[in-house]
Image: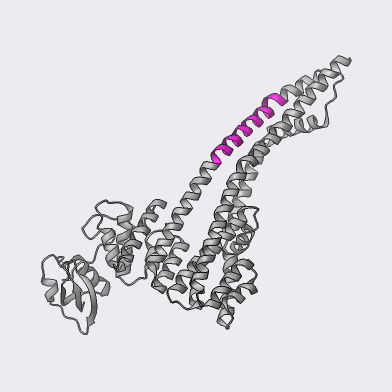
C-alpha cells in the first residue's frame, strides 16, 4: 500500500490538504471522491506508510477492509451504493442528445469535465443517463481520455461521436464540438422522422400492390387459364402466355425464390461488413442515384464544420486534418483525406491539396482558397459548411418529393400491365366465341 499526498477542494470551495493510504492512484481518487473532495493535486509519497493520514480520519470516509485499506468503489456500484448495470450502457438516441446538450452547456458555462459529469451523475432522476455519466466520470477520474471513456461506457457513442470528442479535447473546444454534435444528432433524428412520415403513404401503396398482385397470381389468372382452356379454338396472346407461365412458376417455386433472396441479402451483408470490402462499399454508396449525392454533401458539411472548429481554436492545419479524418465515417473519402494530409505535410496549401485529390467540388475549393488568401480560413470553412448544409436540405426535400410519385408510377405499371393482359385475353376469348 502506498501513501498519497493530496490537495483538494471541499464542497464549500475551501482548499484542504492531507494524506491517504491506497493501493494505487485510482483507488486514492475514489477515496477522495467518496469524501466529497475534488482533487487538485495528487502525488504518491515514496515508501508509503500504513497509518491513516489526517484526511482519511475525517468523518464520511469508508471503513477499511480486512487489509486496512479503504475499499475501492465496487464494480457495478454507484458512490451512494445503488446498483449500476455491468458493462456498457445502451442509450436511446434522445438520451444521447440530452447527455450531449447538458454536458456541452455545463462545460460552456466554465465547469471542468469531471465536475460536470459529477453534476450529471447527481441528477435526481435515475436511469441510463445517470449510469453512463457515472461510468464516464469513473474512467476519466482514473486517467482515461474523455473519448476513450465514451467508447468504454456505451456503444451508443459511435465512432463518429468519439472521434469528434477526441478532436474537441485536442483543440480545447469540447463544448463547441459537443454542441454541434447535439445539433447534428437532432437534425438526423428530424430527417429520419420526415423520411418515415414520407414513406408511410408509399409503403401502403406498395403493400396494396403486393396484395393485388398476389390475388391476380393465385385467383384471377388460374380462373382465366381455365376459361381459355375450355373455349374451343381460343388462342392466347403472348402477354397472357407469359403472365400465366409466370403465375405457375411463382406458385411452384415461391419458397425457393424467397430463400434465394434471403441468402443473397445475407451474403451481401457479410460482404459489405468485411473490413477489406468497406472502402469499396463506401465508394459504391457515393454513386447511388440521388442518395449518393446526399451522402457526399453530408461528408462536405461534416468535414468543413469540424475543420472550422479545430482551426478556429488554434490547432495547426495538419493536426486539424488528422482529427477531421478520424471523425469521418466514409473510408473511401478518408483515403482522400490521407492524401491531403500527406500533401499538406509536404508544404502544399489546403486548397491545392483538395484540387489534387479530385474529391471536392470547385466551388468549395474556391471558398477555401479565398479563406487562405485573407488569413481567415476558419470562417471560409464555416461559410462553405453552411452553404453545403443548405444544398443537403434541398437534396433531401427533392428525394422526399420524388418518392411518392415514383411508387405510384411503379404500382400503376405493375397492376396496369397485369390488368391489361387479362382484359386482352378475355376480349380475345369472347371474340373467338362470337366468331365460332
Q: Is residue 425 magenta?
A: no
Whether residue 426 is situated above or below residue 385 in the rendered picture: above
The quadrant the C terminus occupies is top right
How far across and how far down the image is residue 32, in percent?
20, 70
Tell me: 370 left or right of 164.
Answer: right
Q: Give left or right: position of 327 versus 254.
A: left
Give 20 or 315, whichever is nearer the viewer: 315
Q: Is residue 201 inside the magenta stretch? A: yes
Residue 126 seen? yes
The N terminus lies in quadrant: bottom left
Q: What are the residue bounds of the magenta stretch? A: 199-221
Question: Residue 239: percent from the left, percent from the top?
Answer: 80, 32
Residue 322 relative to residue 264: left or right: left
Q: State the residue at coordinates (46%, 51%).
A: 189
Residue 284 in percent (x, y) is at: 64, 59
The answer to whether residue 67 is visible is: no
Above or below, 92 relative to 163:
above
Image location of residue 162, percent across then percent down: 43, 65
Q: Quadrant of residue 117?
A: bottom left
Find residue 152 and report its image quarter. bottom left
Amino acid at each position: 500500500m502506498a501513501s498519497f499526498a493530496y490537495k483538494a477542494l471541499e464542497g464549500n470551495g475551501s482548499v484542504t490538504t492531507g494524506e491517504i493510504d491506497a493501493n494505487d492512484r485510482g483507488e486514492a481518487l475514489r477515496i477522495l471522491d467518496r469524501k466529497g473532495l475534488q482533487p487538485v493535486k495528487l502525488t504518491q509519497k515514496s515508501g508509503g506508510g500504513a497509518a491513516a493520514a489526517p484526511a482519511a480520519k475525517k468523518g464520511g470516509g469508508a471503513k477499511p477492509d480486512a487489509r486496512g485499506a479503504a475499499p475501492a468503489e465496487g464494480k457495478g456500484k454507484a458512490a451512494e451504493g445503488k446498483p449500476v448495470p455491468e458493462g456498457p450502457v445502451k442509450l436511446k438516441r434522445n438520451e444521447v442528445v440530452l447527455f450531449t446538450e447538458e454536458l456541452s452547456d455545463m462545460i460552456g458555462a466554465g465547469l471542468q469535465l469531471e465536475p460536470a459529469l459529477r453534476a450529471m451523475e447527481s441528477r435526481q432522476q435515475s436511469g441510463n443517463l445517470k449510469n453512463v455519466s457515472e461510468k464516464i466520470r469513473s474512467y476519466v477520474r482514473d486517467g482515461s481520455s474523455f473519448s476513450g471513456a465514451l467508447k468504454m461506457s456505451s456503444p451508443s457513442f459511435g465512432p463518429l461521436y468519439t472521434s469528434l470528442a477526441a478532436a474537441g479535447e485536442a483543440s480545447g473546444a469540447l463544448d463547441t464540438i459537443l454542441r454541434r454534435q447535439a445539433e447534428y444528432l437532432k437534425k438526423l433524428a428530424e430527417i429520419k422522422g420526415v423520411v418515415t412520415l414520407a414513406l408511410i403513404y408509399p409503403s401502403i401503396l406498395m403493400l396494396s400492390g403486393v396484395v393485388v398482385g398476389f390475388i391476380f397470381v393465385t385467383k384471377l389468372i388460374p380462373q382465366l387459364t381455365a376459361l381459355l382452356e375450355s373455349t374451343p379454338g381460343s388462342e392466347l396472346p403472348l402477354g397472357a402466355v407469359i403472365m400465366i407461365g409466370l403465375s405457375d412458376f411463382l406458385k411452384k417455386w415461391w419458397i425457393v425464390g424467397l430463400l434465394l433472396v434471403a441468402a443473397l441479402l445475407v451474403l451481401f451483408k457479410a460482404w459489405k461488413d468485411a473490413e477489406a470490402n468497406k472502402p469499396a462499399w463506401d465508394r459504391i454508396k457515393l454513386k447511388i442515384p440521388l442518395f449518393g449525392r446526399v451522402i457526399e454533401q453530408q461528408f462536405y458539411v461534416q468535414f468543413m464544420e469540424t475543420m472550422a472548429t479545430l482551426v478556429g481554436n488554434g490547432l495547426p492545419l495538419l493536426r486539424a486534418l488528422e482529427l477531421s479524418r478520424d471523425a469521418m465515417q466514409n473510408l473511401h473519402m478518408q483515403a482522400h483525406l490521407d492524401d491531403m494530409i500527406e500533401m499538406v505535410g509536404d508544404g502544399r496549401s489546403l486548397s491545392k491539396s483538395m484540387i489534387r485529390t479530385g474529391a471536392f467540388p470547385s466551388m468549395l475549393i474556391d471558398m477555401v482558397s479565398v479563406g487562405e488568401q485573407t488569413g481567415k480560413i476558419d470562417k471560409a470553412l464555416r461559410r462553405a459548411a453552411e452553404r453545403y448544409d443548405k444544398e443537403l436540405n434541398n437534396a433531401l426535400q427533392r428525394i422526399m418529393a420524388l418518392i411518392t410519385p415514383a411508387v405510384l408510377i411503379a404500382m400503376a405499371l405493375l397492376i396496369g400491365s397485369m390488368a391489361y393482359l387479362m382484359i386482352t385475353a378475355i376480349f380475345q376469348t369472347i371474340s373467338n366465341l362470337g366468331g365460332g
